[in-house]
Amino acid sequence: MEKWVLYALISMIFAGFTSVIAKMGLAEISGELGLTIRTLFVFLFVICFAWNSIPAANWLLLNPKNIFWLGLSGATTTLSWIFYYKALKTGDVATVALIDKGSVVIAVLLAWLLLKEAITMRILMGSALIVSGLIVMIKPP
């Protein structure tokens, strides 16, 4: 198994825990306050991680293009988290998490359009299965 696949699988496991733990933390508080507290912890953890993991020479490699695209990514992450927490506060974790994972289909399309990544039959079938799952889970009984 390639290292990046292992990292992605570990990310998947932590992301699964994140939604359930967050829902538990939202008891008796607003989604907005929950998101704020969570984000403060994320900030502290990432700063500690960066302090211990990033060689000083890497900081010199930053350029305006990196900062622009990473800043834009931060803005879209913020908007995603705001609406995710609004949905998580009142929705079922399983349904909210699945809808959120529909972002895979958006990522596939954007990667194809902007990065010129190939869309293979495997990727098409996987995306179709994700969309099918979304339809099944969000359609009222």
Image (cartoon, rainbow, N blue to C red):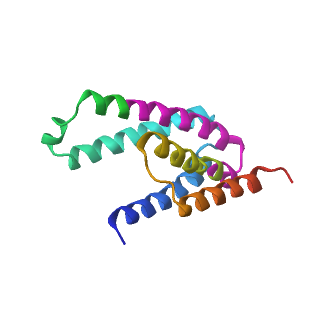
Q: Position of residue 23 (x, y in %)?
A: 62, 48
- Relative to 89, does residue 7 appear above or below in the rendering? below
Q: Is residue 58 left or right of residue 127?
A: left
Q: Is residue 139 left or right of residue 15?
A: right
* Vertical comparison of 70 with 95: above or below: above
User: What residue is drawn where x is 49% and y is 62%?
Assistant: 13
Q: Give the quarter of the image for residue 1.
A: bottom left
Magenta residues, dominant SS class? helix
Magenta residue span: 71-97
Quadrant for the C terminus, please: bottom right
Q: Nearer the viewer, residue 2 or 138?
A: 2
Q: Hey, which quadrant is residue 58 in on the image?
A: top left
Residue at (50, 42) in percent of width and height: 110
The answer to whether residue 77 is magenta is yes
Q: Residue at x 44, y 39 (%)?
A: 114
**Looking at the image, which is closer to me, 127 or 43?**
127
Give the x, y percent position of residue 76. Answer: 49, 33
Residue in view at x 23 percent, y 30 percent: 63
Q: Is residue 39 above or below residue 4?
A: above
